[in-house]
Amino acid sequence: MQMESVRIVIVGAGVAGISAARELKKRGFRDVKILEASNRVGGRVLTKQYGPHIVELGAQWIHGQGENPIYKLAKANNLVNDTGDDSSSEESDNEAQYFTQFGEQIEGKIARDVTTVMNKLYIEGDRFYREGLPVDEGMLSVGSFFRRRFLDYLAACDDQPDRVSLKKGVFDSYVRFNMVDNGCDTMDEVCIKHWGCYLEYEGSQRDVELKHGYQPVLDLLVEDVQSDWIHFDKPVKSIQYNQDDPVSLKQQDLSSPVNAASCAKTSPVKVVCEDGDEFNADHVIVTSSLGFLKENSESFFQPPLPGVKTNALKRLKFGTVNKVYLEFEKPFWDENYDIILCWLENQPFTLSCIDSESISAKCPWYKDILSFDVLDKLPNVLEMWISGKSAVTMETVPDAELQAVVIEILRRFTNNANIPNPVKMTRTYWSGTPYILGSYSYLPVGASEKDICDLADPVPCQKNPLVLFAGEATSPHHFSTVHGAFSSGVREAMRLSILYGGKV
């Protein structure tokens, strides 16, 4: 069978779907359809115009430099803020000020001492995976590992109680930072044994800022895809595949390309959309989010996925990170410092702006707010970060209540009762976004790199790849990232190309 006549359907026009289509076109495939449930491309990449500038409602940075394919693409097109030493991250420009719920700013040395210790522990945690170090039964999670080592550090310091309390507050903020970084409900969920499974790219900057956000990068990717391949507002209801089709490739030697004589023009795969439209295909590449697959896999695939794949879906987790952008008439903060919240433990705290029947009173989600970050290009805007179950709860809070809560939090923590109400508020709802249902994946206790590989394997098998899988959650070493999603799409396109005689 010639590549031009192979029928391929891609489910989802996020980065993984677009990169798969782009690679398929480059390798000679011409009968490709991308079915996108929403009315736009990008998935969890969502750049919003904000006056003359932009805000990122989804992915915000390129994670790493070196051989990162997204970094290389952006750099080649002058889309990153390189200054010669690769110091292109927004984080490199802004330091942080740490505040307690009682309006006390924590001494800079205390904050630096704790973050220095924790950064070393972060690296030490990688060794369990990379060096195969044994894991103590009482320290299976990153959260328990951090706590035990941090308590050892506190014991060695022999500080006064007040200083210990402040250090614990900074430690708490560090844990919440990692909750945002991993998209988890708690670091007690994240597996220490496989903490080092995620691999950083070489380079001086961990998080690289884009000059104009992710949209220009996305536009570059879409430029290489035929516009008539993409079908918007086409949510898929089910994927029906015939794993016992007589023209399947199970018995073929994959050292030889598939040929027309061995593959009659049948339809081993049928993709049924919610509007009733049906698409026959030889292969389908599923790039749906892990959140969607966990929620819908039983009805989405006919026949059901094999046990090894459903077990992987159950073990892997998909978390939520949300943001709130607050625009003020003028800044009241030091433009050089992000505002980090440090909750001192065992201290009562109630908000005066909410009543006892409000969502925020019944479920104090605001205690998981990480920070209010300063944005260089939007000097009148603060960006608030929150993750986990509290981020999901926040999506149910009405705008007026949300604004009242975050402004009182800012006033109390910075000890500034004169902070005005914002003139504009923009918020995200990733857990409630249809067909996405969250932000990104992570490896919990009980899961492993093998689960990611099992999720990435095609169905029924590698010799007969009727249903293929891409997306950040299928990237064993770059999950949760845009470049992981991109590379996974390329991987599956190459799988099909090799199947039909293409070069690696």
Image: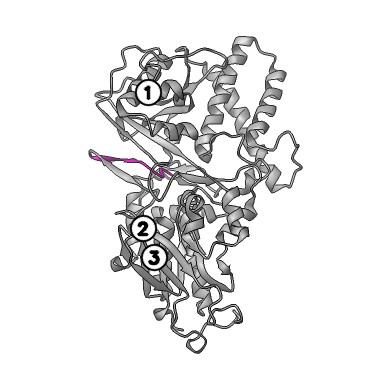
Magenta-highlighted stretch: main secondary structure?
Answer: loop
Q: Which residue is pictured at 59% across the width and 24% down the height?
A: 114
> Which of 61/321 is in front?
321
Q: In the image, residue 458 lies at what x, y percent?
A: 55, 66
Residue, disc 3: 272
Q: In the structure shown, which secondary structural element does the residue marked by tag 2 occupy?
A: loop
Q: In the image, residue 69 lies at what x, y percent?
A: 47, 56
Q: Residue 134 carries which label?
A: none
* Residue 40 in view, yes or no: yes
Q: In the image, residue 369 lies at what x, y percent?
A: 45, 27
Any magenta on residue 54?
A: yes
Q: Which portion, as a residue range, is magenta?
A: 52-61
In three-dimensional space, the C-alpha distance between marks 3 and 2, rounded to whole angstroms, equals 9 Å
Q: Residue furthest bottom?
A: 261
In three-dimensional space, the C-alpha distance between marks 3 and 1, rounded to whole angstroms, equals 44 Å
> Which of 485/234 is in front?
234
What colouring style does the render use?
one colour
Q: Earlier in the sequence, mark 3 or mark 1?
A: 3
Q: Which residue is pictured at 47% across the width and 42% down the height?
A: 207
Q: How crowded is mark 1: few (under 14 residues within 10 Å), some or many (20 or more)?
A: some
Tally the marks.
3
In three-dimensional space, the C-alpha distance between marks 1 and 2, rounded to whole angstroms, equals 36 Å
Q: In the structure shown, which secondary structural element does the residue marked by tag 1 occupy?
A: helix
Proximity of marks 1 and 2: CB atoms separated by less than 8 Å: no
In the rendered structure, which amino acid carries the disc numbered 2?
Pro
Can you say whether 376 is above or below 502 in the image?
above
Can you say whether 498 is above or below 233 in the image?
below
Q: In which quarter of the image is residue 423?
A: top left
In the rendered structure, which amino acid carries the disc numbered 1?
Val
Q: Is residue 213 left or right of residue 142?
A: left
Residue, disc 2: 235
In the rendered structure, which amino acid carries the disc numbered 3?
Val
